[in-house]
């Protein structure tokens, strides 16, 4: 039997946390017993303590005004990790999302530990090795999932990723966490 999962996504001010880009939204949804618990989703805006570049605003439609009164990452990240407790994290292109969480945890004075995270993009690459593209849009089309209207916002992306994960688990007949780790594991990230 598979354990509980928390599928998550972050929206950011840019693509590289090592160049000062920050998280501006984080969302997660739990999957327990093969069921997406959408009604209990976690979603919070995060004040990045810097302005959001024009390019990022065009992608995720999050403005400086949206995050001005939001809590900072040192408040949001521990709440998210509490939400995800006793589950295995999953993200699409997990190296990107986990790279940001590793950088942002420094704002929490080292008081947070990040759990294991598996990757739905890696899972797609494993299940569909002859396919060239594995971004979330392509994977969703391949699995015949309905695209949300608000793509590139954390919660709609999380719900789409959760649906894709369940379909891929079924398609790959994955019965154990060891099966998933082999197919969806990411290399260990160094903070």
Image (cartoon, rainbow, N blue to C red):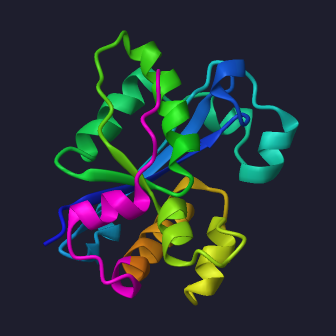
- Horizontal placement of 161 versus 183: left or right? right
Across and down, in percent, residue 33 comes to 17, 74
Residue drawn 24% across the image and 61% down it: 178
Answer whether residue 183 is magenta in the image: yes
Answer whether residue 3 is magenta in the image: no
Q: Which corner quadrant holds the N terminus? A: bottom left
Q: Is residue 174 visible?
A: yes
Foreground: 5 or 12? 5
Residue drawn 59% across the image and 74% down it: 129
In the image, residue 32 sits, relative to residue 92, either above or below, namely below
Q: Is residue 146 visible?
A: no
Across and down, in percent, residue 51 comes to 75, 24
Which region of the structure is painted magenta? 169-191
- Horizontal placement of 112 versus 33: left or right? right
In the image, residue 78 sits, relative to residue 158, either above or below, namely above
Across and down, in percent, residue 175 comes to 22, 76
For residue 30, what is the image quadrant? Answer: bottom left
């Amino acid at each position: 039997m598979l354990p509980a999962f928390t599928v998550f996504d972050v929206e950011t001010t840019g693509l590289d946390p090592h160049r000062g880009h920050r998280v501006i939204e984080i969302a997660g949804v739990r999957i327990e017993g093969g069921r997406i618990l959408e009604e209990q989703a976690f979603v919070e805006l995060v004040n990045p303590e810097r302005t959001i570049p024009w390019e990022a605003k065009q992608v995720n439609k999050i403005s400086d005004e949206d995050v001005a009164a939001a809590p900072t990452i040192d408040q949001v990240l521990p709440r998210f990790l509490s939400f995800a407790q006793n589950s295995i994290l999953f993200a699409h292109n997990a190296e990107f999302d986990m790279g940001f969480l590793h950088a942002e945890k420094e704002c929490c004075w080292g008081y947070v530990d990040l759990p294991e995270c598996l990757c739905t993009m890696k899972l797609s690459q494993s299940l569909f090795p002859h396919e060239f593209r594995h971004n979330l849009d392509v994977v969703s089309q391949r699995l015949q999932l309905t695209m949300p209207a608000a793509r590139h916002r954390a919660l709609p992306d999380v719900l789409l990723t959760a649906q894709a994960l369940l379909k891929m688990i079924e398609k790959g007949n994955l019965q154990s966490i060891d099966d998933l780790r082999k197919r969806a594991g990411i290399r260990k990230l160094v903070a």
